Image (cartoon, rainbow, N blue to C red):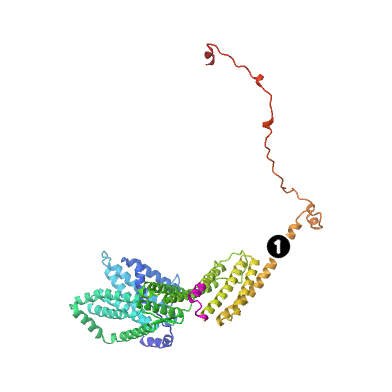
Amino acid sequence: MENNNSENTQQQQPIVSHAKKFSLHILQKIKTTQLQNGLRHGDYQRYRHFCTRRVRRIRKGLKFLMGSRRKVSQKRSQLQLEKVNDVRYLELYLFYSERAWSYAMELKDDVENPRAKFHSLKRFKKAVKWANQLNKLCHEFADERTILEAESYCSWTHGNLFLEIEDWKKARDEFIKARHVYEELSKVGSLENQTLCKQRVEEIEPSIRFCLYNLREKTEGEDYNALISMTTKNEGSGLDHIKQKLESVVRFSNEKSDSLRDVTWKGQIIPITNEKLRLCLIDIIETTSDLDKVQTEAEKLPFFDKIFMKYTEAQKIVKEDKEITAMTKNPLLEYLKATALNKTVDRNLLLVRLTESKIDFQELEPNVRRKQTTKPDEIVRLYEILLQNLSELKELYGEADLSMSKNLSDRELTFKALRCFYLATSHAKSGKWNHAIALLDRCDVRIREAMGSSPSQTTADVLKELQRRSNASSLYVNARAFLESQKLEKEEKSDKASDNLLTRLDSYDATFLEKKKLVDFPPSYQIIHCKPILFDVAIESCSFPSLEHKKTPAKKGGWFSFLTRT
């Protein structure tokens, strides 16, 4: 077996050497998911269910399923190193370990079940198994900081296992190793990662003291600190490689932090004196570099969200800094707004490409039901937002930077031409051929204006492709408009031919002989005037004869007439 394993590692060595180095903030990932899914209130069951769903989503997204619905395939369930091309493979093993650990912690609280303790111990061992596999995978495909976090996470899971089986010495050594790595990582990186590493050190501290208490060693004052430092130094070869990686990570972080001491805006060098702002800008640079490594466009959107959150945080820091706000003009805030707007333009262009890929431009038939729900109107709306972003960028840059203002003007003309083209496509899909022809003509005018301003090579290529598509669409739309006009003429002729002979006495057409239609029967309704309203105004001037003589005289009553009334 050892020979086979050595042969496999030798075969996979060239693959690993060319493999892409992934970056995964393990502690930040698990802390965020834990707080959002139940561990804020100590609900380990809810967090375990979340880990199960997350593992399922990752496997489905990577198409790394265990098999079909009927059976499980051993070959498909085993991970092959040459197929690791996504950081989600690292997250898969991380959430496997988190699921086993949360189940073990859930079983520890079950005091009524006498077998829960043994089941919990098995789940702790399972968590250690997945943590070891995560550590091995990170050594092959991750950068140095991710490797350090994986090793400290693996040491922490080992410490939890040894703590359960009451092997105090091994538990102490593993916890001290994890504490040492997290303590060093708390000095580098972003402010959020530093805070999380410090919190992890505080969480590990009671476990170390509990192990020392059971080993009957002192846990107070200078003796405790000396014991920690002595254990760290006397670990031998177990911590040598960790120390080397920590030194390289610290050196790399210091180089990046020292390199970002100022920024340039409109030819002016602006120093960055606020430490929080500098760390925030470093995070933006790191996230941007991670964004450039992503190959598929759909996976880039979450990175843009992180970048915009960091820009919002940086602007908030600048507004709260009293030294910066004391200036009459705030060039640093303008720089942040301009760079954020540039990223917004890039994000909107990405959305345009994603939306355009869902539209079939070959089928411009109006009033046809299709499965797709995406319409050209959505791209028109995106280009309107892009034009608004460019107008805001023009206000920020002004006329100080001539090259930037020319670039913005060229992009504005290009976006206007693209907006006309997609608006014409929208009208063509609605059957409004005349509107589409007018918009395509306007698109050609915009293209000529943009090409006349000698744009860059990239913009010129976009305009040439747009002109080719506009000419093709113009031919199609003009042909459809001509066919539509011919169709209307035929309908008018058919309407005239359907008239009877009586209505066409002044024109000769022999079609009534075929239909044998001389008159319409039953006749059609005709419009007539409504009944007039008569007002009797002569009654006031008429005199009528008296009718008093025709009245019957009333009978006179006597003394006893009231008896006859009853």
Vertical comparison of 478 with 269: above or below: above
Q: Is residue 379 left or right of residue 170?
A: right
Indicate the position of residue 386 as horizontal and vertical percent values: 52, 72
Residue 546 visible here:
yes
At 26% from the left edge and 76% from the top edge, which residue is drawn? Answer: 162
Q: Which residue lies furthest to the top in this view?
A: 559
The reply to whether the magenta stretch includes residue 470 is no
- Residue 500 against residue 183 in the figure, above or below: above
Task: Classify 10 Å Cα crowding around label 1: few (below 14), some (14-19), many (20 and above).
Answer: few
Horizontally, residue 156 falls left or right of residue 299, namely left
552 in relation to 255, above or below = above
Residue 194 spot, x, y in % from top left? 33, 77
State the residue at coordinates (78%, 50%).
Answer: 519
Q: Nearer the viewer, residue 175 or 325?
A: 325
Quarter in which the N terminus is drawn: bottom left
Label 1, secondary structure: give it: helix
Q: What stretch is highlighted in magenta?
A: 389-402
Q: Does the magenta stretch include residue 395?
A: yes
Q: In which quarter of the image is residue 417?
A: bottom right
Q: Name the residue under label 1.
A: 488
Kindly tell me whether residue 299 is visible in this rendering: no
Q: What is the x, y in percent for residue 546?
A: 67, 23
Q: Where is residue 477 in the image (x, y as percent from the top left)?
A: 65, 70
